[in-house]
């Protein structure tokens, strides 16, 4: 049987591509190497399924550090608002939480996965589970189908690769598609970890003095050895036995990975502003005021009124001020050092955890070889891409899944329009 559209990959991008293509009137086959669809969708948002982010498009784009400009057309055609309408149309009630994150009211990813997968089957998409692909088939610059690992060939007029990257391999994202598309002339930007914890060799990390300590509502900045700030991210962090994790640290990982890919020997450091809502001079003035009002109070006790005890110990170590020093005995040098510890607590960053432990993959199929208006390959007619298999990535918080749904929808519709119009233009649904 000749399909109009073959979709490889049953994750968020592949599911949306199959739905979009079938809704446009195409005969669609969805091929998944695993035993069920939607595995990555089922673990997103901590198992609650963060289906998108409700922030306005310009702000949403700011949270896509990996080739956001390439995604402008896809996001304009199928935005976060469209994604919310899609899920509500499936009967999934949604709610918006902090920082624009959108979840199902059920707080259960399983309800979302079931609704989407049921919709795929209800539309009449032919689903092939436990079906690994060996390679893509093309002739004279035109895609012809896919050769399965079992030896059978699935023929199609168009084909969408939506196999994901290399992160979270337990969901099936193991980089399978890279050699397939390389064989057709495509360039692969070497994969690298993003949205992943940062590592440090500082003694306080090695001795686990701050392990398990969480800081909320801080600013963390990453600096290179020339003193250039690479990024500043706001949010929460968690100290671990290897470095730092938490949403704000994960958002920094793109910039750390990018810097180290350019220069593996580069020296990076992080600074934490533990009180970002307070200006440096304001904090210093408050300390001077406290010294007048409570001259015999120790600096250790004073700092513990606003900071966790373990963090205070590290800040005092960095400032080289004894914890029992009375406020009245603080010198101007002491106060300046303490201000730095509070507003720019510094430590070395050696890199990130490996790609296998990342939430998101950076790198992938070069977007320079993909038409952003259709997601079609510029090198092979009828070949389309969707989601994380491309060199696109975003921060956590509903942004990555938005990219997956948006590019999946565009690729699916573009492939269907091409394939169905070739056979019978009148059957294409608007």
Image: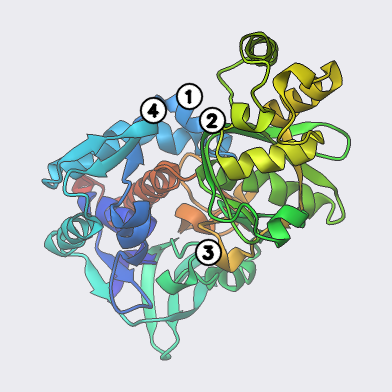
Sequence-wise first label, 4 or 2: 4
**Which of the colour schemes (rainbow, by chain, secondary structure, one colour) is used?**
rainbow
User: Which comes before the other along the chain, label 4 or label 3?
Assistant: 4
Q: CA distance from mark 2 to mark 1?
A: 7 Å
Q: Residues within 10 Å of mark 1 (few under 14, many from 20)?
A: few
Residue drawn at x 39%, y 32% as measured from the top left: 99
Where on the picture, by quarter, is residue 155? Answer: bottom left
x%, y% of residue 56?
Answer: 40, 24
Q: Are marks 2 and 3 in contact (CB under 8 Å)?
A: no
CB-based contact (under 8 Å), mark 2 and mark 1: yes
Give the residue at x 69% y 11%: 288
Bin the neighbour count of mark 3 within 10 Å (Cα to Cα): few under 14, some 14-19, many 20 and up: many
What's the distance in space between the residues labelled 2 and 3, CA to CA?
22 Å
Q: Which residue is mark 3?
A: 167
Left or right: 45 as drawn, with respect to 71: left
**Which quadrant does the C terminus fall into?**
top left
Residue 55 badge = 4
Q: In this rendering, would 208 be left or right of 56?
A: right
Q: Position of residue 144 (x, y in %)?
A: 45, 70
Q: Which mark is residue 62?
A: 2
* Whether residue 248 can be seen here: yes
The answer to whether one can see residue 365 in this image is no
* Marker disc for residue 58: 1
Q: Residues under labels 4 and 3: Cα distance? A: 26 Å
Answer yes or no: do the residues labelled 4 and 1 have beta carbons within 8 Å? no
- Quarter of the image that includes the N terminus: bottom left
Q: Nearer the viewer, residue 374 or 318?
A: 318
Residue 345 location (% of width, % of height): 71, 35
């Amino acid at each position: 049987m000749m399909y109009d559209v073959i979709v490889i990959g049953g994750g968020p991008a592949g599911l949306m591509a199959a739905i979009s293509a079938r809704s446009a009137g195409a005969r669609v086959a969805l091929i998944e190497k695993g035993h069920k669809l939607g595995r990555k969708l089922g673990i997103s948002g901590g198992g609650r399924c963060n289906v998108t982010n409700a922030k306005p498009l310009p702000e949403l784009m700011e949270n896509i550090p990996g080739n956001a400009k390439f995604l402008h057309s896809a996001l304009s055609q199928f935005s976060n608002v469209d994604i919310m309408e899609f899920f509500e149309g499936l009967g999934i009630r949604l709610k918006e939480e902090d920082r624009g994150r959108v979840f199902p009211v059920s707080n259960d990813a399983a309800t979302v996965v079931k609704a989407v997968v049921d919709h795929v089957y209800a539309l009449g998409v032919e689903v092939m589970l436990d079906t690994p692909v060996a390679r893509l088939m093309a002739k004279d610059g035109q895609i012809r189908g896919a050769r399965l690992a079992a030896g059978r060939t699935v023929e199609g007029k168009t084909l969408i690769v939506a196999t994901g990257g290399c992160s979270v391999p337990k969901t099936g994202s193991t980089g399978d598609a890279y050699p397939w598309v390389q064989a057709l002339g495509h360039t692969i930007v070497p994969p690298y970890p993003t949205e992943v914890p940062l590592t440090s060799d500082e003694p306080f990390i090695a001795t686990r003095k701050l392990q398990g300590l969480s800081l909320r509502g801080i600013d963390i900045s990453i600096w290179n050895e020339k003193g250039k700030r690479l990024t500043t991210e706001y949010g929460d962090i968690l100290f671990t036995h290897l470095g730092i994790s938490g949403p704000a640290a994960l958002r920094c990982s793109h910039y750390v990975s990018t810097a180290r890919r350019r220069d593996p020997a580069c020296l990076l450091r992080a600074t934490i502003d533990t009180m970002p809502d307070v200006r440096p001079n304001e904090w210093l003035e408050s300390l001077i005021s406290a010294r007048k009002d409570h001259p015999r109070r120790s600096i250790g006790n004073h700092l513990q009124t606003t900071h966790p005890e373990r963090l205070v110990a590290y800040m005092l170590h960095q400032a080289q001020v004894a914890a029992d020093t009375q406020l009245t005995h603080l010198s101007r040098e002491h106060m300046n050092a303490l201000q730095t510890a509070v507003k720019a607590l510094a430590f070395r960053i050696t890199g990130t955890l490996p790609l296998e432990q990342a939430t998101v993959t950076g790198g992938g199929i070069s977007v320079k070889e993909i038409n952003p208006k259709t997601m079609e390959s510029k090198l092979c007619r009828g070949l389309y891409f969707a989601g994380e298999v491309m060199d696109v990535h975003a921060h956590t918080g509903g942004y990555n899944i938005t990219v997956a749904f948006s590019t999946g929808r565009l690729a699916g519709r573009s492939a269907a329009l091409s394939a169905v119009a070739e056979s019978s233009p009148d059957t294409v649904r608007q």
